[in-house]
Image (cartoon, rainbow, N blue to C red):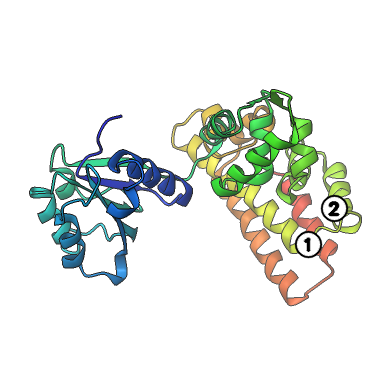
Amino acid sequence: MSSPAPIVACVGAEPWLREEAIRALAAQCGAPGSAVLDTVSYPARETAPALIVDAARTPPFASPRRLVVVRGPLDADDEALGWLIRYAQSPTASTCLVVEFEEAPPAALRAARGVLQEVACQPLRGGDLAAWVRRRMSEAGGKTLAPDAAQALAARAGADLSRLAQLIEQLALFVGSRPQVTVADVTALVGWSVEERVFAVVDAAIRRDRATALRVTRRLVEEEGVAPEELLGALGKHVRRLWQAVRRVEGGTSPAQAVQAAGVPWRAQAAWIPLVSRLSSSVVTRTLERLVETDTQLKTGAGTPLALLEPCVWELAGLS
């Protein structure tokens, strides 16, 4: 197991990945049974830099290396980070100092070669998220996932890795001695999210099947009890994906790559490709503005929910 650099920067806003990185660093730095004695943690915004540096300069008590964790993103500003930049010029070899950044660390810190190690902790999307689900199921659950099951789990549970990790453990127990988790297992345990049920409306709208799109909208509200505001929010999320894909195409990305990067569910990507090829972002922007206007009307009671929702669905199904 390689030894971590004197300074490790966790870059990104995904808390589960940050905690996983810190756990791995603790295992690398600490001697068995004594890691807790040589691990200290400080809140970034409430701790004087001098105290952090003093902790980093303190020799380890019973472990090969001391782990000092600064929790909370640091300002990526050279002046605010002066203490860290100065420390990086002469770090303590027996300490691993962990800091967090929402975006890439500044160039002045990166200039200290061999001192800084970056760990990617950005939220996962699309294929990266599905790959993480498959890997986690294998490592933590000892199971494999059927080809469509990883995408189904990510689509229904969202991109929250903490929730996904819990569901993966539950699925591993749910299937018992069977070696593989199927889509049917995911459906039985997790069910269908509002976002996925609303996608049936979007799917019909993209096929310009207004009758089906309106029928599914009515069923969701009147029979399945989906709150109109929740339905509109999920619909807005799908339309924002459409806008993102169209903007990427306008910027020169291929339609296939654009819909994948926008997080369009894998099973719908083929249907989205011709749509994003012919739409302009200005057209999709008007639809988004209509959804925002409808959201305000719903919240102020400016009309009955279906009377407000159905024109949005009708307009979405007419995009061209």
Outermost residue toward the left in this view = 90
Q: Which quadrant holds the N terminus? A: top left
* Location of residue 288 by image quarter: bottom right
Q: Position of residue 214 (x, y in %)?
A: 85, 49
How many neighbours does mark 1 have within 10 angstroms: few (below 14), some (14-19), or many (20 or more)? many
Query: Eyeballing the image, is 195 above or below 249?
Result: below
What residue sits 61% from the left and 33% below the top? 141
**Could you say whether the residue bearing mark 2 is in a helix, strand or loop?**
helix
- Disc 2: CA contacts within 10 A as few (<14), some (14-19) or many (>=20): some
Residue under the image location 64 percent in, 27 percent down:
143
Residue at (21% x, 62% y) in the render: 52
Looking at the image, which residue sits at the far right?
223
Residue 38 point in image, percent of width and height: 27, 52
User: Which residue is painted at 31% across and 38% down in the image?
Assistant: 28
Q: Position of residue 109 (x, y in %)?
A: 17, 48
Observer-nearest residue: 211 or 159? 159
Indicate the position of residue 319 as horizontal and vertical percent values: 69, 43
Of 25 and 122, which appears nearest the observer?
A: 25
Please tell me in which quadrant of the rendered image residue 150 appears. top right
Query: Disc 1 residue type?
Result: Pro
The reply, left or right, for residue 60 in relation to residue 209 is left
The amino acid type found where label 2 is placed reads: Leu
- For disc 2, the marked residue is 220
Instruction: Read off the residue under disc 1.
Output: 228
Q: Is residue 260 left or right of residue 37?
A: right
